[in-house]
Amino acid sequence: MLVVKIGGSPGVAADYITSDIAAYVQRDEQLVIVHGGSELATELGHQLGYPPRFVTSVSGHSSRYTDRRTLDIFLMATALRNRHLVAQLQALGVNAIGLCGMDGKLLLARRKDTLRIVENGKRKILRDDYTGSIQEVNHTMLCALIESGLTPIIAPVALSTAGEPLNVDGDRAAAHIAAALGAQHLVILSNVPGLLLDIADENSSMPCLPASELETAIETIAQGSMKRKLIGAREALHGGVSQVILADGRKTKPITRALQGQGTLISG
């Protein structure tokens, strides 16, 4: 079992990724795909006159502040990307099924009551935020879909205990899904070749990162969205996934390249 996270950042090549997915499916490999939607949500927000607001938590993690209108924009963007990926895969002969975490209670999450941020050097508390942390994955439903020959394509939207849609981090969603399915590998594809020691130098990608050094890397090396990828990697490993690979989604055969050692391999 292989779980692949397709990043939503600029430059990630969906055509290359879907072609590689099709090659694996044709060899009867079982895959589950999780995708982001950050770039499309940002574009759509600007088009609708409601640009995104990005905030930094007190722990230094950057995220999209998701009020109710932003949530609606995020739902539209992730649904559109999901449909595009399903269409691309169907055209390549993959019997893909598009889902979000609300469908069949696939992803249940706890809504964060407040969001504590630092803005202009001051600590603030934001309310009316529709983000959450995943508590449960309906692996029974996923396994049934996979066993019936379908390839799930999952958007990072979860359901709260009160029945509300929630924006959840795609990397961490992929980590929880990989752990729930007992996947051996989780491949996270983005617009960089791996964990960079120098964010301005793509040649500074680390070839490997022991799990024992993850905490240090989160605090001292990772910047921006890479922090969340490493947090997702930590959660996947804790959940029993053998290896997490941070790899380049801009190149041909990106999944194959990742599994052949091109990227940052994180393992115990």
Image (cartoon, rainbow, N blue to C red):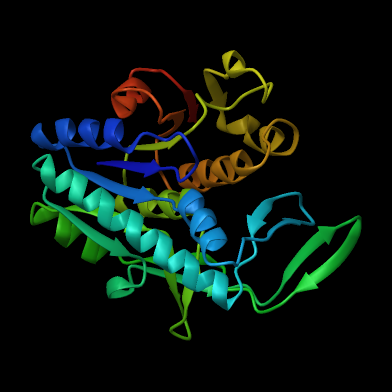
The residue at the far top in this view is 203
Q: Residue at x 31, y 66 (%)?
A: 138
Instruction: Name the residue rendered at 35%, 72% in the picture.
Output: 102
| Residue 191 shown left or right of residue 220 in the figure | left
x, y percent for residue 240: 41, 44
Picture coordinates of residue 209, whole percent (x, y) = 56, 25
Residue 31 sits in quarter? top left
Furthest residue to the bottom?
162
Where is residue 156 drawn, in percent x and y?
42, 59
Identify the residue shown where x is 70% and y is 30%: 221
| Residue 227 in picture, x, y percent from top left | 63, 42
Q: Using the image as rendered, state which of residue 104 and residue 185 is in the foreground.
A: 104
In the displayed structure, 13 sits above or below 71; it is above
Q: Height in image: 212 above or below 207? A: below
Quadrant position of residue 49: bottom right
Image quarter (top left, top right, bottom left or bottom right) of the N terminus: top left
Residue 180, relative to residue 167: is it above or below?
Answer: above
Do we see residue 135 in this rendering? no
